[in-house]
Amino acid sequence: MDSIRSTLEARMEPEDAQAFYGRWARLYDVIARRTPGIPALRRRAAAACRLEAGDTVVEMGCGTGANLPYLREQVGPEGTVIGIDFTGPVLERAHELTSEYDNVHVVRGDATRPPLARLDDETAVDAVLATFVVGMLADSAGAVDDWCDLVGPGGHVVLANAARSEEWYAPPVNAVFRAIVVLSTPPTTKLRYENDPHVRLDEKIDAAHTRLRERSVAIADETHVFGVVRLTGGRLETS
């Protein structure tokens, strides 16, 4: 475990985003764990990583750690779970909630430049999970490419993200979704945007999930929570 810790190097993000998400860390934690349907989704996302006992999994943008216990269930006490996020207060919460596990590590860093480079030859990354993350990235498809390269042939990458529903009952669901996106986009005091945040979010999510499908040889696509949450899991081609 000490060798794993020594390979991890945190990187900082802009201070305004740090401050915004830091202030709301505990509220986000409640939402992440208590919203109806979301705990089941997190368990499903962890299962989609196709992990086995002893594997190593990295969660990009782990937030307050809501997924980490589910990932730990998949790899068991012999495996390794690493959660990466850029916000200090958020990671503090994640550390509090996973402190009982000696094989779960939370690290401050940037999901687009993850502070690990395959760790070492003996600790290859078997899967990468990213939930509700790619919509925050400037180049979501490029990030997926990097995560696929990190995992390598035969590994798995799983994405779960919220975007506008395409179900028949979508209009009221999407109205609520748009309000949530606006309120969760810093700064929340901005009432009018030149480009709607939810439209930009959809574009980034579509690009990321499309890229994962392009890079994968086995693909699972699902929708959850009134059609708002899209889950895509891909197994990368073996060498």
Image (spheres, rainbow, N blue to C red):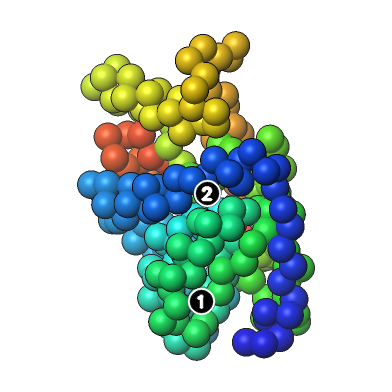
Residue denoted by label 1: 104
Residue drawn 40% across the image and 23% down it:
178
> Foreground: 45 or 109?
109
> Foreground: 4 or 206?
4
User: What element does badge 2 sit on?
Assistant: helix
The reply to whether dot 2 and dot 1 touch (C-beta < 8 Å) is no
Of the residues tagged 2 and 1, which is closer to the observer?
A: 2
Q: Earlier in the sequence, mark 2 or mark 1?
A: 2
> Foreground: 29 or 78?
29
Residue drawn 40% across the image and 47% down it:
28
Report whether residue 13 is seen. Answer: yes
* Quadrant assignment for the C terminus: bottom right
* Quadrant assignment for the N terminus: bottom right
Task: Indicate the position of residue 136 as horizontal and vertical percent values.
Answer: 59, 38
Task: Indicate the position of residue 124 as horizontal and vertical percent values.
Answer: 67, 76
- How many dots with numbers? 2
Question: Which mark, by number, is residue 48?
Answer: none
Question: Which mark, by number, is residue 22?
Answer: 2
In the figure, is residue 24 to the left or right of 149? Answer: left
User: What element does badge 1 sit on?
Assistant: strand
Q: Amino acid at mark 2?
A: Gly
